Every structure is written in structure tokens, then in C-alpha cells.
Amino acid sequence: MASPKAPGQGALFAFEGGEGAGKSTQITRVADTLRAQGWQVCNTREPGGTVLGEAIRAVLMADHDVPMPAMSELLLMFAARAAHLAQVIEPALADGQIVLCDRFTDASYAYQGAARGLGHESVATLERLVQGERRPDGVLLLDLPVVVGAARAAARGKGNRFDSEAQSFHDTVRQTYLERAAEAPTRYQVIDADQPAETVAEAIVSRINHWLGS
């Protein structure tokens, strides 16, 4: 890939993984390292990243008196994603920045498509409609056993309704991520997230630099 400093040559890297995988921590570490290397970096998250996206995130993460229908959840995710792409991701890419995104569409395939049972095609249809040809240039899958991730999430003390799902739900999420990574090994990098944070960050930076050709 050409240097993302040139206009129109930005790069989008998605950080994926189950609850407690350390995505937010790693994005902060990796962004600092890449900036020190001279890159312009935009770090952001999904759902969120915009005023509208953060408002939708609050709805998605909160507990409600009745379960949220799976299709409502999926549509809200893509409503937030549409704003995120239009207002943050595409402008940053056009400016030649590296975009580090805490979750992207792989999460929709894992959580809503597989774990919620909506199926691959429901997500794929919205992906085509909302994103057009836009896909991540690389996906960093921070993988660790579900029980380890659950313990980490509990230790954070800031649970949401996804944290409280049954282990079978999170097992499905993890398996779906791993299957997607296996199907496109040049675009995905599976990182063992059950390691010291410094070790994980080094592995991520190494892979991103490889993808960037630097």
C-alpha cells in the first residue's frame, strides 16, 4: 500500500474481538506508536464516533424493560455506521490518515448475524447499502478465551447488556470471528490477546506496518 500521507491513500484498520479483549487499550497504544513513527492517525469507535453515533450507542448498550429485537439492534448499528463513515472515516481517509476503529462490520457479522441469529445475508445486504465498496484494509482480531474476556469485563466494573449475555452467545461471537479470519488470512491478523499489553501492541504495530508496506 502506498504511504497514507498522500491524499486519498489513507488506510482503515479495524480492531475486533469479544468482550474484554483490550481493543480500546490497544488502539490508544498503537495510535501513539504510529504517530511517533510520523503517521497521521484518527482513532475512533463503533458504535459511536459521531454525535449521532454516540447517542445510538447509549441506546444499544443500555438495559431496557424488554429485550431489544435483533433486527432493531442491527439496524441501529448500521445507522450509526452510516454517520460514522460520512462524518469521520471517509474524510479522514481522504486526508491520508490511518484510521484505527474499535470494531467495524465484522462485529455485526459476529454479534447480530451469528449470535443473534439474523444470518450472514442480512448483514451483507446492509453492508453493501451503507458502505458500498468500503472495507477495512486490515482487521486485527484480538482473540482470547471467553472466560478470560468475561473476567476482564467484570473487573472493569462498567458492564453493558452485551457483557451479561450467556457464555454460548460469546462462544458464537468468538467462533464467527475466527472463521472470518480463516477465510481471508491476508486481510486478517489473529493476535493472542491473552498476553501482556506491551506484547500485544508490538504484534499489532508490526502487522500494520507490514500492511502499510513500511
Image (tube, rainbow, N blue to C red):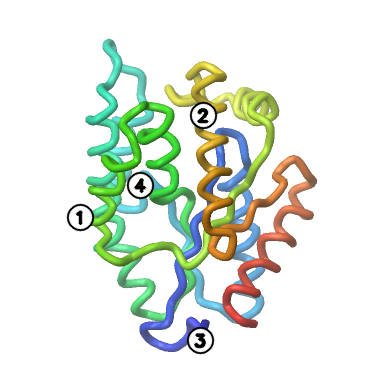
Residue 19 drawn at (x, y percent)? 56, 33
Disc 1 to disc 3, how far (Cα)? 28 Å
User: What's the distance in space between the residues labelled 4 and 1, CA to CA?
Assistant: 19 Å
What's under tag 1, amino acid-wise?
Leu
- Using residue 68 as the reference point, say whether residue 38 is left or right of it: right
What's the mark number on residue 172? Answer: 2
Q: Nearer the viewer, mark 2 or mark 3?
A: 2
Residue 55 in view in this figure: no
Residue furthest to the top in view is: 65
Cα separation, mark 2 vs mark 4, equals 24 Å
Cα–Cα gap, marks 2 and 1? 26 Å
Q: Name the amino acid, label 2.
A: Thr
Q: In this rendering, would 144 be left or right of 43?
A: right
Label 2 crowd (10 A; few <14 / some 14-19 / many >=20) = some
| N-terminal-most mark, 3 or 4 | 3
Q: Find the distance from the CA under tag 2 to the CA under tag 3.
A: 36 Å
Q: Residues within 10 Å of mark 4 (few under 14, many from 20)?
A: many
Q: Is residue 100 left or right of residue 191?
A: left
Q: Position of residue 20 (x, y in %)?
A: 61, 34
Q: Nearer the viewer, mark 4 or mark 1?
A: 1
Q: Secondary structure at mark 3?
A: loop
